[in-house]
Amino acid sequence: QVQLVESGGGVVQPGRSLRLSCEASGFTFSSYGMHWVRQAPGKGLEWVAVIWFDGSKKFYADSVKGRFTISRDNSKNMLYLQMNSLRAEDTAVYYCARDNWGIDYWGQGTLVTGSS
Amino acid sequence: DIVMTQTPLSSPVTLGQPASISCRSSQSLVHSDGNTYLSWLQQRPGQPPRLLIYKISNRFSGVPDRFSGSGAGTDFTLKISRVEAEDVGVYYCMQATQIPPYSFGQGTKLEIK
């Protein structure tokens, strides 16, 4: 069965960096685009970034463009989100999710908290 | 960018009764390939989102048949024929036609009266 397991969340000071990871299993990872979606406490879903199945294209939400970088390693079935210049408003649960002309599978999420 | 607007934002429903949620997009969601990439997600309390419906009306694997989706163009509806206690949560519509960005509705909270 499809499994997506995020890791790397934690408490980070504003202005610092953090890298999230997502380990995928149960499907042919290299055949699917992958997303990061976040959810601030008590709020709705916000799309963050997507990467094409082969890494050839990447797109970002305006709110993170220039600060966050999505990447993948198909040899390791891993998805990453490098988050730089973190702000308090980046505080959220970050979900790794599989693209299928929308999103069909979601991980459990990892919490990132920006706090001084 | 496409804006997705859901109504109502909160829906108190009696167990066993039907429920309906509307989602409207600011532009047509018909893709150049002829498909409409509008999906519905359910998020139970404390859980990640889960796909219910894709391409307007297709139930995802394991989704009970009391859930159904309909609509076209810019107007879409999720219906639950008979609400059960396990249906409590927040429901989101999502578009993947005109990207980037992908966009979600604000969410509709379904609660039991």
Image (cartoon, coloured by chain):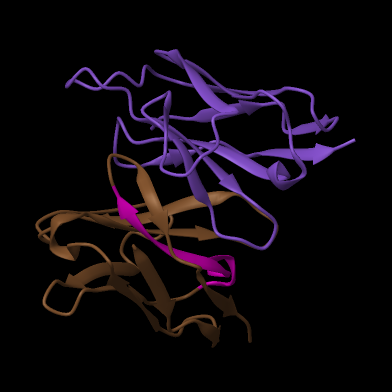
Chain colours: A brown, B purple
Could you tell me which residue is drawn at 58 percent across and 44 percent down?
A: B42
Q: Is residue A68 left or right of residue A30?
A: right
Q: Which residues are magenta?
A: A87-99
Q: Residue furthest right?
A: B113
**Picture coordinates of residue B20, whole percent (x, y):** 67, 22
Image: B96 above or below A111: above
Q: Is residue A112 left or right of residue B102?
A: right
Image: A38 above or below B66: below
Quadrant where the N terminus of chain B sits is: top left
* Quarter-of-image position of residue A23: bottom left
**Picture coordinates of residue A80, whole percent (x, y):** 29, 74
Nearer to us in this view, B99 or B83: B83
Q: Does the image show residue A3?
A: yes
Nearer to us in this view, B96 or B17: B17
Quadrant where the C terminus of chain B sits is: top right
Nearer to us in this view, A49 or B31: B31
Q: Is residue A60 left or right of residue A30?
A: right
Asked whether B55 falls inside the magenta stretch, the response is no
* Quarter-of-image position of residue A93: bottom right
Number of marks in the rendered image: 0
**Picture coordinates of residue B92, whole percent (x, y):** 56, 39
Could you tell me which residue is drawn at 20 percent across and 71 percent down?
A: A72
**Picture coordinates of residue A12, whole percent (x, y):** 53, 86
Could you tell me which residue is drawn at 63 percent across and 87 percent down?
A: A116
Could you tell me which residue is drawn at 86 percent across and 30 percent down?
A: B14
Prevalent SS, magenta region: strand
Q: Is residue B96 left or right of residue A33?
A: right
Q: Does the image show residue A62?
A: no
Asked whether A96 falls inside the magenta stretch, the response is yes
Nearer to us in this view, A12 or A50: A50
